[in-house]
Amino acid sequence: MHIITHTCPDCGTVVAANELEANRVMKCPGLGCQSVLRFDDLPADDRDFFLDNREQYQL
Amino acid sequence: MKGVLLAGGTGSRLRPITHTGPKQLLPVANKPVLEYAIEDLKDAGITDIGVVLGHKGREAIQELLGDGSEYGVDITYIVQGNPLGLAHAAGCARDFVGDDDFVMYLGDNILKQGIEDLVESFQAGEYGAGIALQEVQNPSEFGIAETDADGAVTRLVEKPADPPSNRALIGIYVFSNAVFDVIEELEPSWRGELEITDAIQDLLEGGNPIDSHVVEGWWKDTGRPQDILDANRLVLEDVADDRAGEIVTDAEVTGRVDLAPSARIEAGAVIRGPVSIEAGTTIGPGTYVGPYTSIGPDCELADVHVENTVLVGESEVTSAETIVDSLIGRNTRIGSAADERPAGRRLVVGENSNLKL
């Protein structure tokens, strides 16, 4: 499985794509970090792959 | 080498205790389970640790561990989100691990003797992975490794009907960087998860030797209430006698007692170690605290007899009853019903509770 993550540029917290896609726009889950993370922060290829294979990333 | 500490999961087998917090923060001998893993990693020379978080308890775990500086380590948080399996959790750590090898440690495990031997054994050869094993009585309930005479793994089988050995994978692994490419090629299992045993098997079939190390001493997966009590008992077996708190004259204290500085044992109380009593707790008159009991911070006990039990903390127990083999969650009140009419127990019990009256 291609595992896609994004790293918060401010605090370094790593967030899996399933979390980003579920929220689309979210406050960084790093405690005290005020950054806003977006599914659109992922490279276009990763976004497309995730959306084409979305069922793999769900329970 | 880096560490990847898994701290996700729902803790469903520990409900109702885990309705309000992650299982990895439950105390064993008054220390959160997760801290034992941090210490094991640090003792093995691993100070760069990624903590993988699920949906539950993210904030509580970050509040406890912070940036790791209090433990002498550097912590990066990795949010896995959906629990898509141990191999998925490892894969989420790829950017954090970079080109290093790494130890993956399930955060609800406790080992008596740490992981230094496992890491040294892995580093002594050119292995794709190293796995910690322990002999179990019920191998059909575990992932089982078949090994040759030198300890090299020849086959892994998940919950076999006809086990090739009784050596079970206990949830602590060392991986070379090669595992990430293997995980990229893995498909979810029938239960929709990326299985770490599949990743190790694929490493093996790809020509990467797999080291194994049989863990000496005890090991506990603290997934159920009885496991917490067992782990508490095992850790208290080695607790030091450190009576920093106040013991009033006419209190009777014997055995090894770890008494925090602001804890107090009052006259007429009887303590028989091994016992751990946290800060701010008062053991009042008429109380008996027996072996293998851990009492968390800010508790008040009076008249009760308690043994082989874990009180998480901030609780009041004043009933003249005997409580044994119990796990009591935070902010609990257990009082006396002796003067109540009609006579009988009064219970306010949360969902998924388990009582024997």
Image: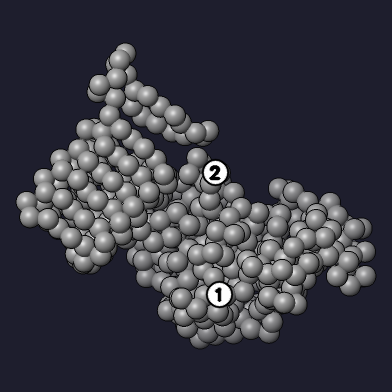
Q: Sequence order check: which comes first, mark 2 or mark 1? A: 2
**Residue B186 in view:** no
| Residue B132 percent coordinates (x, y) | 49, 68
Give the amino acid at mark 2: His
Query: For this view, does A56 lie left or right of residue B232?
Result: right
Question: Which of the 4 quarters of the picture holds residue B259?
Answer: bottom left
Q: Is residue B297 above or below residue B325?
A: below
Q: Nearer the viewer, residue B149 or B116?
A: B116
What residue is shown at x 25% (from left), y 58% (from top)? Answer: B263
Give the amino acid at mark 1: Asp
| Residue B48 percent coordinates (x, y) | 56, 80
Which residue reaches farthest left?
A: B250
Q: Mark 2 Cα within 10 Å, few/some/many (few <14, many 20+)?
A: some
Residue indicated by mark 1: B67
| Residue B49 percent coordinates (x, y) | 57, 75
Q: Is residue B35 above or below residue B283?
A: below
Disc 2 chain ID: B
What residue is shown at x 72% (from left), y 77% (from top)? Answer: A10
Disc 1 chain ID: B
What residue is shown at x 92% (from left), y 58% (from top)? Answer: A52
Q: Mark 1 Cα within 10 Å, few/some/many (few <14, many 20+)?
A: some
**Pointer 2 and pointer 1: residues touching (CB < 8 Å)?**
no
Q: Nearer the viewer, residue B147 or B66?
A: B66
Residue indicated by mark 2: B19
Q: Nearer the viewer, residue B40 or B62?
A: B62
